[in-house]
Image (cartoon, rainbow, N blue to C red):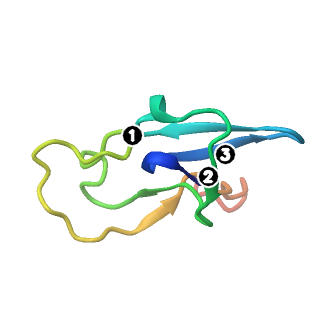
Amino acid sequence: MLELEHGVTGLAFNLEEDNVGVALFGEWDKVKEGEPVRRTGKVASVPVGEGSSSRRRPARQPARRARPHRSRPRRAGRVEAPGVIQRSP
């Protein structure tokens, strides 16, 4: 995950020798070429558990009239699937 100016968050997905492809979350129209970018040290994750799917919109903004919620566990957005033998039939 990356942090850009104006509080915009991004997900690095394409690393090349001279550029980086980034999916932006938030007010992407404020981002300009050449602005500083910082690594957050975090991996993209999503809240898991009962009721998590209806609490957030894709851009990580709280849904309208959302009730206050307690902290929920999070899971990495990309995880290794178990091998075929370890899966239940």
Q: Position of residue 29 (x, y in %)?
A: 46, 28
Q: Earlier in the sequence, mark 3 or mark 1?
A: 3
Amino acid carrying mark 3 in the image: Ala
Label 1 secondary element: loop
| Residue at image point 38% right, 59% down | 48
| Residue at image point 43% right, 50% down | 7
Q: Nearer the viewer, residue 39 or 82?
A: 39
Residue wearing tag 2: 78
Amino acid carrying mark 1 in the image: Ala
Q: Assess disc 2: are there few (<14), some (14-19) or many (≥20) residues with their C-alpha within 10 Å of its C-alpha.
A: few
Q: Assess disc 1: are there few (<14), some (14-19) or many (≥20) residues with their C-alpha within 10 Å of its C-alpha.
A: few
Residue wearing tag 3: 12
Task: Give the quarter of the figure containing the N terminus.
Answer: bottom right
| Residue at image point 14% right, 62% down | 68
Mark 2 or mark 1, which is nearer to you?
1
Label 2 secondary element: loop
Amino acid carrying mark 2 in the image: Arg
Are discs 3 and 1 less than 8 Å apart at CB? no
Label 3 secondary element: strand
Are discs 2 and 1 less than 8 Å apart at CB? no
The reply, left or right, for residue 43 in relation to residue 66 is: right
Q: Assess disc 3: are there few (<14), some (14-19) or many (≥20) residues with their C-alpha within 10 Å of its C-alpha.
A: some
| Residue at image point 19% right, 64% down | 69
Label annotation for residue 59 = 1
Calculate the distance from the C-alpha at mark 3 to the C-alpha at mark 1: 15 Å
